[in-house]
Image (cartoon, coloured by chain):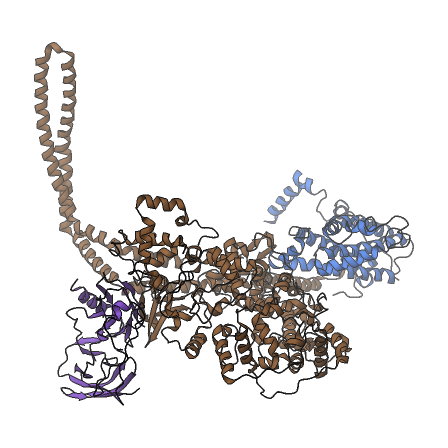
Chain colours: A purple, B blue, C brown
Amino acid sequence: MKYKGFFVLIITLFMSSQLFAYEGGDVSNGGTVSGKAIFKGAAPARAAIDVTKDKEVCAATEHLSDLLIVSADNAIKNVIVSIVDIEKGKKIEAPAANPELDQNGCVFIPHVIAITAGTTIDILNSDAVTHNVHTYPEENTAVNKAQPSSLKRISIETEFGEEDPMKVACDYHGWMSSWVGIFEHPYFAVTGDDGTFTIDNIPAGAYEVKAWQEELGELVKTVAVKAGETTTENFEFEK
Amino acid sequence: MNELLRKIIEVLTLSQIWRSFFRRKHDGSKRSNVLAVVGNFFMHFHPIKIKRHAIAVRYTWCMGGFTFFMFLFLTLTGLLLMFYYHPNVRDAFWDVKDLKYNVAFGKILRNSHRWGAHLMVITVMIHMVRVFMTGSYKAPREFNWVLGVLLLLLTFLLSFTGYLLTWDQLGMWAITVGTNMARATPFIGHEGPFGEQLGMTAYNDIRFALLGGSMVGPNALIRAYIWHCVGIPLVVAFMAAVHFWRVRKDGFSGPL
Amino acid sequence: MIFKNKLEEDKSYAPLFLALSGILMAVLIWVIVDEAVIIRPWKGYQKRFYKLEKEFLFNKVLDERAAFEKTDDYKNYLDIKAKLDQATERYNSKDVKKREKELIAELNRLKKKELKPVTSKLISARNKKLEIEYDFGHHPKKKDYYLKKIKDIEADIAKYESQQSSLVKKKDAITQNISLVSADVQKYTAELKQYTGVIDSIDAKYEAVKRKRPTLQVYQTFIPELDEADRCMSCHSGIKKEPGISDENPYKAHPDRDYYIGNHPVEKFGCVVCHDGQGRALTSVEEAHGEVEYWLTPLLRGKNAESSCIKCHGMDMDFEGAKTLAKGKKLFTEKGCYRCHETKGFQALEESELTGPDLTNVAYSTKPNWLVAWIQHPKHLRPDTSMPNFDFSRDEAEAIATYLWKVSEQTTENFNSPQFSASEIDEGRKLFSTKGCYVCHSDGNEGLDFAPNLFNIGEKLNYDYAVNWLLDPKKYQPKSVMPNFRLSENEARLMAAYLMTLKTNKEDKQQHTFDMSLADAGEKLIQRYGCFSCHKIKGMEKVGRIGVELTKIGSKAINFLDFGVLEHELLHEVGIKYGHENVGLTRRTWIKNKLKEPRIFDEGRYKLPKDKLRMPNFEFTDDEIEALSVFLGGLVEQEIPSNFVYKPTEKKKDYNDGFKVVEKFNCLGCHQFTLDTITLNNGSVVEGVIKKEKKGKVYFQLWKESKEFKKGPGQTVRFKKDDISIHEKGIGAKVAGVLTANLIKDHGISEKEVVNYLPPRLYGQGQKTQPAWLYGFLKSPIILRPWYKTVMPTFNMSDEEAEKIVKYFAIRDGAEYPFEYIKEKNRGYINDQERKHSDYMAKAGELFNSPTVNCISCHIRGDVMPEGKPSDWAPDLAISKDRLKPEWITNWLTDPQTIQPGTKMPTFFSKGMYQDIMPGDPEFQIQAVKTFLMNFNN
């Protein structure tokens, strides 16, 4: 079971390679793009989540809304930055273990992740209530499975890349959501608390780099990547 | 060589079989020549000798003979047509079409029968004009003239009955008009004078007798067929025979 | 020559006879040539066809051969053949042959000289033994003697046997050696066989093509019932053969051969029954096509051939091959032609269909200005109306309006609507946009065109009437298809307020007042122009028709079609001088010109006003005229024998009837009935919906299993857009785009959520709901999903119509109809289960109510609503036992995504879950929950 995701990834890559044809190989002297996602204006406060169901479990700890997390110095968290439609680059490496989304206290932790197509995601249920895992992909097959507290782990497979990140939500608890960016190439990153991102080992050339945030939308910039050098590109969002 | 040939001919022509076929000698003698005509079933009608003026074409126009020839021609083509024609309402029209499209030489067969019929009527009329012009209706030939008129009428009736056999709009309506005229006949037609008084209705008058019904339909067709192919030709044959016999007996009328 | 003064016997008629003979000879030759060649054009066509066919087959064989030569198999074939040739050469060489000969000689010698004698000795010894054994038995006193003898003979037998076996071994060895000599040849010959199969078949085809063509002959299909002898194939020799031999007539194959000829084999139907013409004719092209004088049924070319479908298929024309005809019939029905012109087969529609609205209350509903303007030229006010243009003068229109006003039952003097605030009007607009009006009506900006366009309805209707109309349409127009939306009075008022704002001229002109003295003139006009044929007018309900009967218009004699003075001009346009040159063409020309401008035949003639032509102008487009002429051309006299008439199966008939009702009420406006079916270039077929199209790639959600993709319903597959060979779009949900936009705009529903507010897909409906319940629902809809903004209205359809729709779904989805045995409702079954599994129903109830499954957390249960916001709710479970089919419930509970991909209902039951509540595998648990649902009483 440990290597199941790996095999699925390889097989799916092989199958989808017929259509997408991302060529993964050795990149010598690749460039890097790094930068920061910045919020223009005063950093908005995070509202508390309104728990309408299963209060005993879900309202036990207060959670703040994770729709838009801006730090004191205007750094935006959970921004997915990726290169648009890159066709040749470094090899895709399967992750050591399946990435996890944990339903904990009736919120998804982490709120945003990004993976390559073919990776299997594990959804955990650490709560004492039933959640349901409902994905809303535009390209991939949707999944809607009930996950009682007894079922600790459910696996979701992905096959195709998604143009926009895929929402994973729980219908039982309407405020619960998470986002998964699925790409058919390995050039992506998710900003952390400090709002920074780094994408490395890119073959030299001009590319479109897209930054996406669930509330603020997306920004696309053209970036010239030079061999062996780091290009800095910041994304300034405003509401 | 000639001697041999002559010898062969002699043996041949003197054999019993030859003599059973030909009852006369072929020696060119006057007697043999006379017997050629008189001893022939088909030709004995024909005079052995005729007066010179009888074959003056500018005088006779030959129209009588022509008419008779047309009659024979029509009989022959008509006979051949009978092989391909069914006198019932389902088949009649289509058979005529098939004659045109499908039967080998059917087109010319049917067309020549039709044109021949027209021609026969024309020639018989010209014949009558000629007979009138040459005064050949006068005594003692009055009876023959009457016969001729009857033959003319029969010719018309042949055309009339034959017209229906194609079973198309032309024929059907022609016969409709004709038989509708018949119902106006006195005494025997239900729309004629005194017809009603004599108990004539649309179902028992002369029109009904002609049509075999009250409308032009399947019965009318078969009746027309019988009249056209059997009835009238038989009558014509007899009357024509008497007509020719009278011409023989009365002799050709002489020059003016 | 005949000379005057010569004696007859001296005259020579030789010149005359010569001349006559010459003429006769010439005629004879002409007759023979005419007969053999000129009137047999089919010979030439047939000959050429066979030549083309030969070329075609030839090329096909060569292509096959070339294709084969490209394959690997061919390379292998050549290899092996080469090896075989080598082996054969070796085999045929002197030494090898010599050796073989020697071996064979050796073998024969062995067999003859050594083996045979030994074998015969052995046989005789065995026989002897039998003899001695017999003697042994018969001479008990001489036992020993005979025993010894037996022993001796047994020794002999053993000796011979061993000799024989060694000789046989030698023989086998030699035989083996012999076969070794030719081993190679045999091996390669056998190997070659697997390829020669293909080569041989290609060569056989080649030989077949080279074969002499069949003798030229007349091909005829004789059909006695129809009285037809069709000889069309004598020239059109390729009509049944495969397409591709030629593209021009008469050599080409029938278009869509497999469809038309596949369904109507030539041997049974012939050609003329569909195409008319003169089947028996062979002498020329014009004769054969019947395009000759007076022939009543000349060839029907192109789309006109569709006219003949009516003869056998009747008025059921919903099939691929008669699209123009179906369009013509649709126009004939919709425009109401049969109302003025009696036509057999359409009388029933008079009762049930609405062509023109009931004018009994026109003084209450309509504003006077509109009424007069409308009567004068309807299309100026609403371009897509079915009402034709009568070309009335202003005075005539006023007179008619006056009469209608006079006899109107209800009247009003108030033509102004009350004042409303902008927000109220906007409320009304919101109601209009989401109650479902757009499904049938357009308001000038968006919406469908099934029902009249409302862009200027404010100019037409009076406010009071509009409100009452919205509350109950059938009260004023009993035949109308418009349903009752079960509006509250306030909703109706607001919507009417919005409707009153839909105007093109914003200024309120003074409304016309009627001079009642014109009413009589109006009445006469109405009687003359036959308004009562389409509209119900008080006092004129029983009046007859003013138009000519059209039942057999397709066979109407052309001399009854009055061209007026335009005959030569119009016929010249289509290429003939006199009508009888092509009877069919003349008739069609007359009909088309009549439809284009119905009163055209009055042109240039002096006529008293009362004799002038009356038919109004429908302003048909040329396409519509063609379609109508095809339809009318099919209403002919010919009666087809019953064994030719198309008899649909009961199922098909019910299916078609049901779909007609579906079309009548515009169900397709809201609901999706079928899904997209896409055939890919590699032959695989997928059924479902397109999720997304991006950069030449299509993401397709399967609703039905796809074996080629190895995926089941609910799962997404991806393929290139270029790979699509046929895309059959699903029918229905025409309003989806408009409704989605309006729900998002007016009700703030998010893009992702809006799919839960759209009318449900009816794919698989027959398998989902119980027929009796669906029937009741159609007669009187209930709210199944309370969060919906757009709710199914009450159509007030008749019992028959509702039944037809239910039957349609059952047939379409292959479901049981009308009864189905539901074992779960049977007390006996439940007791049985209780016996086998203790506390069966109690446990099922526990599972149902358990916090991990918790059906009622989302599902409505009778009067009890779940928690959370309404858009998260699910349908009422209390009605499931009457509404849903049990098998559907099973499939649903097993995996909802396979039945309704994208649904919010999660998959609950999988192996190993809920063992603490109800031990067993998922199928068992699902069956239990289903049984519980089927007996749900709460």
Q: Position of residue A170 (x, y in %)?
A: 29, 69
Tell me what residue is drawn at x 15 percent, y 24 percent.
C126
Nearest the viewer among C11 and C760 is: C760
Number of marks in picture: 0
Residue A158 appears in the picture as rendered: no
Q: Is residue C529 left or right of residue C632?
A: right
Q: Quadrant for the C terminus of chain C, please.
A: bottom left
Displayed quadrant of residue C878: bottom left
* Residue C222 x, y percent position in the rendering: 57, 54
C539 or B213: which is nearer to us? C539
Q: Is residue A145 left or right of residue B2?
A: left
Residue B231 location in percent, x, y? 77, 48
Q: Based on the displayed image, in which of its 4 quarters is residue C67 positioned? A: bottom left
Q: Nearer the viewer, residue C921 or C561?
A: C921
Relative height, residue C840 to residue C481 (above, below)? above
Q: Nearer the viewer, residue B246 or C391?
A: C391
Q: Quadrant of residue A148?
A: bottom left
Q: Let me know if residue C813 appears in the view.
A: yes
- Horizontal placement of C467 versus B117: left or right? left
As drawn, C761 above or below A112: above
Position of B199 with respect to B219 (left or right) is right
On the image, the x and y values in percent for residue A94 come to: 17, 71
Query: Dividing the image into 4 quarters, which one contains the N terminus of chain C?
Result: bottom right
Residue found at the far bottom of this picture:
A41
